[in-house]
Amino acid sequence: MYFADTPEKRIRVYDYDLDSGVLSGERVFVTVEGRGFPDGSTVDADGCLWNAEWGGGRVVRYAPDGRVLRVLPLPASQVTCCTFGGARLDRLFVTTARTGLDPSALAAEPHAGALFAFDAGVSGLADAPFDAKL
C-alpha cells in the first residue's frame, strides 16, 4: 500500500496483510525532488506506481524499486490525481486544479483545472473490492 506524505515530499510504502488488515514494514519508497509534491497515485499492471505531483506539473511513473521510468509533463502545475480507464484500461486520466493560482498564473496556465487523457502505453488494474476489517 502506498501513501503520499505530501508535506514531507515522500511516498511511503507499507506491507498489508489481507487476512488481518494489519499494516507493517513502513518504508520510504521515493523522495520527490524538485518543486512538486506527491499527490494522488495509481498502480499499473506491471506493478509500477504513477504519481501526480502537485505544484510540479507532471505525473511520474516509478518502477517497483523506486526508479523513475517516465515523466509525463502537463500544461497545468496543480496535478492532483491519475487513474486508468477505457475499455482496455490503457488510458491514463489525470486531474488538475486551479486552487491557489492567482489571475496571472491562470493566464499562464489556461488548462489549469482540466482533465487530461493519455495513451499510457501500459494497462492499469481493474478495481478490487476492499474489505476493511474494523
Image (cartoon, helix red, strand yellow):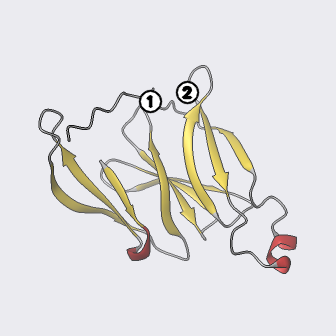
Q: Position of residue 88 (x, y in %)?
A: 57, 21
Neighbourhood count class around disc 2 (C-alpha, 10 Å): few under 14, some 14–19, many 20 upward: some
Looking at the rendered structure, the secondary structure element under dot 1 is loop
- The residue labelled by disc 1 is 125
Q: Which residue is mark 2?
A: 89
Whether residues under marks 2 and 1 lie with C-beta atoms below 8 angstroms apart, the answer is yes
Q: Residue furthest top?
A: 87
Residue, far right: 107
Q: Residue at x 57, y 66 (%)?
A: 54
Distance from the alpha carbon under mark 2 to that under mark 1: 7 Å
In the rendered view, tell whether residue 127 sits above or below residue 13. above
118 sits left or right of 2 in the view: right
**Quadrant assignment, res 12:** bottom left
Residue sitting at 44 percent across and 37 percent down? 44
User: Which residue is at the front of the view, 91 or 69?
Assistant: 91
- Lateral position of residue 21 relative to residue 107, left or right: left
Q: Position of residue 58 (x, y in %)?
A: 61, 60
Q: What residue is shown at x 35% (from left), y 57% (from top)?
A: 3
Q: In this rendering, would 3 be left or right of 120? A: left
The C terminus lies in which quarter of the figure? Answer: top left
The type of residue carrying mark 2 is: Leu
- Picture quarter containing residue 77? bottom right
Task: Say if 122 sits above or below 50 in the image.
Answer: above
Amino acid type for the residue under numbered disc 1: Leu
